[in-house]
Amino acid sequence: MSEFLTALSRVIDPELRVNIVELGMVGEIQETDDEVTVQLKLTIAGCPAAQKIERDVIAAIETPKTVSVRAGVMNQAERDALKEKLRAGRPIRSNPFDADSYTRVYLVGSGKGGVGKSTLTANLAVALAADGYKVGLIDADIFGFSIPRQLGVTEKPTKVDELMLPPIVDAGAGVVKVISIGMFLDGNQAVAWRGPMLHRAIQQFLTDVHWGDLDFLLVDLPPGTGDIAISLGQLLPTAKSIVVTTPQLAAAEVAQRSAAVGLQTGQGILGVIENMSWLEQDGRRTELFGIGGGQQVVDALSELANTEVKLLGQVPISVRLRECSDAGTPVVTTHPDDAAAKSISAIAKIVAADKLVRQNKSLRLNT
């Protein structure tokens, strides 16, 4: 049966991105003169990926015989073993992004709404993944969540006991794992929570979600400088801030205050992105929101942090960017030649250059 196991090791669980043999999902394999039967152990009853896995199992076994799959569900001991393997030795409900983490964490904030922060965060995550990186994205804007729509994510996380498997967005060479409070609500339901519940929700996004071995974690912050920003500052000790503003000076002043809170809670600043920098028509640029807001934020934060803060890039106004965000098809992959897509992709390469170098760190499971 070894040849069958070898073939099945090429079947990848679409939620965990690990082969089903390594995950312990392959049970007994029976072979008769005219049939091969594979016992498949799913993580949960009603697993949303069940049909795809079954098809892939049948396709993987190259034989003239009939191949059939007998699907069942892991018992508790098997699920416990799987969760232990996924946690790679970490305690239950521990924060994988503590001070020892090799994941680069970025808190994307703006101070005020309406500057395109969520749109830039979603496209930055996809651009990084398209370059082959493993990316996580937390929609921490509990009241104004929009990341699921922007990425076209409609499915809910799969729960394996206390562990949540986040939906995954394919981006060519890499993937984006996404979590948002919007995935747990019915329709366009509103959220009306006070501070302690907000803190608990953010904490669960970090500790109860199986993030695996990420290169980057992007967090889409809500506008303002309230409870969530403070909680994340406490929970993500290695995070850096990416500040989004527009050229408008009023927006720039608010963005400065947002980044200042990050400095108070211990975050460094990677840089500033100026969005909606200009509108280009017939080869002419029109600065609808003025000029200089991004540079003003850079200058103010450089002085405040006593270090050089960079302007990561300027993103022009783009109809394509807006249309693709509404449609859930990120512009960086669907229309890479769009001016805004080019700017965002260039910023993603600057962000990627800040990636932590891994040395002398062995990982039990690469997911």
Image (cartoon, rainbow, N blue to C red):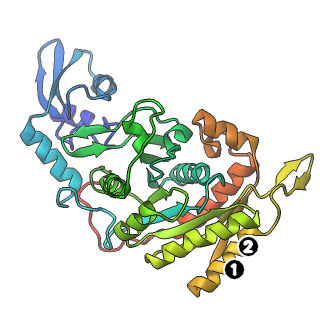
Q: Which mark is residue 41?
A: none
- Which element is circle 1 on? helix
Could you say where residue 338 lies in the image, as x and y percent from the top left? 74, 46
Quadrant assignment, res 233: bottom left
Residue drawn at x 24%, y 25% as measured from the top left: 46
Q: Badge 1, how many Cα within 10 Å: few under 14, some, many 20+?
A: some
Q: Choose between 46 and 229: the one closer to the eye.
A: 229
Q: Which residue is label 1 attached to?
A: 299
Total marks placed: 2
Q: Which residue is label 2 attached to?
A: 295
Q: Which amino acid is tagged 2?
A: Gln
Mark 1 to mark 2 CA distance (whole Å): 6 Å
Disc 1, disc 2: CB below 8 Å?
A: yes
Residue drawn at x 63%, y 82% as measured from the top left: 302
Q: Choose between 227 and 98: the one closer to the eye.
A: 227
Residue 21 relative to residue 236: left or right? left
